[in-house]
Amino acid sequence: EQASSIIEPIIIKYLKLTNLTVKHASYKFMKTRWGSCNTKKKYLNFNILLLASPLVAIEYVVLHEIAHLKYPHHQESFWNYINIYMPDWKIRKNKLINSIFI
Protein backbone atom coordinates (compact mmCIF):
# COMPACT_ATOMS: atom_id res chain seq x y z
CA GLU A 1 0.00 0.00 0.00
CA GLN A 2 2.80 2.43 0.86
CA ALA A 3 4.47 1.83 -2.51
CA SER A 4 1.21 2.44 -4.31
CA SER A 5 0.46 5.65 -2.42
CA ILE A 6 3.88 7.09 -3.30
CA ILE A 7 4.41 5.75 -6.81
CA GLU A 8 0.85 5.92 -8.20
CA PRO A 9 0.70 9.77 -8.29
CA ILE A 10 4.05 9.82 -10.10
CA ILE A 11 2.75 7.32 -12.65
CA ILE A 12 -0.31 9.50 -13.25
CA LYS A 13 1.85 12.61 -13.60
CA TYR A 14 4.11 11.10 -16.27
CA LEU A 15 1.31 9.33 -18.12
CA LYS A 16 -0.39 12.72 -18.52
CA LEU A 17 2.84 14.36 -19.67
CA THR A 18 3.67 11.64 -22.18
CA ASN A 19 0.08 10.97 -23.25
CA LEU A 20 0.66 7.23 -22.78
CA THR A 21 -1.53 4.68 -20.99
CA VAL A 22 -1.04 1.64 -18.79
CA LYS A 23 -3.48 -1.05 -17.77
CA HIS A 24 -1.90 -2.14 -14.50
CA ALA A 25 0.87 -1.27 -12.05
CA SER A 26 2.19 -3.66 -9.42
CA TYR A 27 4.62 -3.34 -6.53
CA LYS A 28 6.75 -6.24 -5.37
CA PHE A 29 10.21 -7.22 -4.20
CA MET A 30 12.60 -7.77 -7.09
CA LYS A 31 16.18 -9.00 -6.69
CA THR A 32 17.84 -7.42 -9.71
CA ARG A 33 15.90 -4.40 -10.95
CA TRP A 34 14.07 -1.27 -9.86
CA GLY A 35 11.23 -1.72 -12.29
CA SER A 36 10.05 -3.44 -15.42
CA CYS A 37 7.54 -2.91 -18.19
CA ASN A 38 5.53 -5.38 -20.19
CA THR A 39 4.98 -3.40 -23.38
CA LYS A 40 2.47 -5.85 -24.88
CA LYS A 41 0.16 -5.94 -21.84
CA LYS A 42 0.98 -2.35 -20.79
CA TYR A 43 1.88 -3.45 -17.26
CA LEU A 44 4.37 -1.62 -15.04
CA ASN A 45 6.14 -3.32 -12.14
CA PHE A 46 8.10 -1.54 -9.42
CA ASN A 47 10.43 -2.86 -6.75
CA ILE A 48 9.22 -1.98 -3.25
CA LEU A 49 12.87 -1.35 -2.28
CA LEU A 50 12.66 1.69 -4.53
CA LEU A 51 10.97 3.47 -1.61
CA ALA A 52 14.35 3.69 0.14
CA SER A 53 15.53 6.07 -2.61
CA PRO A 54 14.83 9.82 -2.78
CA LEU A 55 11.61 10.89 -4.50
CA VAL A 56 13.51 12.37 -7.47
CA ALA A 57 15.09 8.96 -8.09
CA ILE A 58 11.73 7.22 -7.85
CA GLU A 59 10.38 9.65 -10.45
CA TYR A 60 13.26 8.71 -12.75
CA VAL A 61 12.46 4.99 -12.49
CA VAL A 62 8.77 5.62 -13.13
CA LEU A 63 9.48 7.69 -16.23
CA HIS A 64 12.05 5.11 -17.38
CA GLU A 65 9.46 2.33 -17.28
CA ILE A 66 6.75 4.47 -18.87
CA ALA A 67 9.17 5.38 -21.69
CA HIS A 68 9.46 1.67 -22.47
CA LEU A 69 5.81 1.72 -23.54
CA LYS A 70 6.92 3.82 -26.52
CA TYR A 71 10.52 2.58 -26.87
CA PRO A 72 10.96 -1.05 -25.73
CA HIS A 73 14.76 -0.81 -25.81
CA HIS A 74 17.64 1.31 -24.50
CA GLN A 75 18.75 2.81 -27.79
CA GLU A 76 19.47 6.51 -28.27
CA SER A 77 15.84 7.32 -29.13
CA PHE A 78 14.76 5.94 -25.73
CA TRP A 79 17.21 8.19 -23.83
CA ASN A 80 16.30 11.19 -25.99
CA TYR A 81 12.66 10.62 -25.09
CA ILE A 82 13.43 10.53 -21.37
CA ASN A 83 15.52 13.67 -21.75
CA ILE A 84 12.49 15.56 -23.10
CA TYR A 85 10.54 15.04 -19.87
CA MET A 86 13.43 14.87 -17.42
CA PRO A 87 16.61 16.65 -18.55
CA ASP A 88 18.30 15.89 -15.20
CA TRP A 89 17.65 12.13 -15.40
CA LYS A 90 21.34 11.22 -15.02
CA ILE A 91 21.54 13.07 -11.70
CA ARG A 92 18.34 11.43 -10.53
CA LYS A 93 19.55 7.98 -11.62
CA ASN A 94 22.72 8.43 -9.58
CA LYS A 95 20.60 9.03 -6.46
CA LEU A 96 19.23 5.48 -6.57
CA ILE A 97 20.53 3.27 -3.81
CA ASN A 98 22.67 1.06 -6.06
CA SER A 99 24.27 -1.01 -3.32
CA ILE A 100 21.17 -3.21 -3.08
CA PHE A 101 21.92 -5.04 -6.34
CA ILE A 102 25.30 -6.74 -6.05
Image (spheres, rainbow, N blue to C red):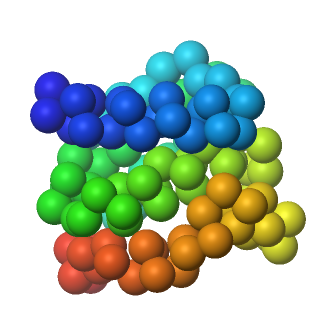
Q: Residue furthest right?
A: 77
Q: Nearer the viewer, residue 44 or 102?
A: 44
Q: Residue furthest top?
A: 23
Residue 68 versus residue 10 in the image, above or below:
below
Q: Is residue 72 left or right of residue 57?
A: right
Which residue shows up at 37% across the image and 65% down it?
57
In the rendered image, the vertical position of residue 98 relative to residue 7, given as above or below: below
Q: Is residue 47 left or right of residue 51?
A: right
76 above or below 1?
Answer: below
Quadrant where the N terminus sits is top left
Identify which residue, 96 or 13, lies in the foreground: 13
Horizontal and vertical percent for residue 95?
A: 33, 78
x%, y% of residue 29?
A: 22, 47
| Quadrant in the picture for the C terminus | bottom left
State left or right for residue 53 relative to residue 12: left
**Residue drawn at x 59%, y 24% as measured from the top left:** 22
Q: Work out whether residue 89 can be spotted.
A: yes
Answer with the quarter of the image where residue 50 lies.
bottom left
Q: Position of residue 87 (x, y in %)?
A: 64, 71
The quarter of the displayed image where residue 83 is located: bottom right
Q: Examine the rendering and report whether any part of residue 42 can be seen.
A: no
Q: Is residue 75 left or right of residue 29?
A: right
At 48% from the left edge and 20% from the top edge, which residue is drawn? 24
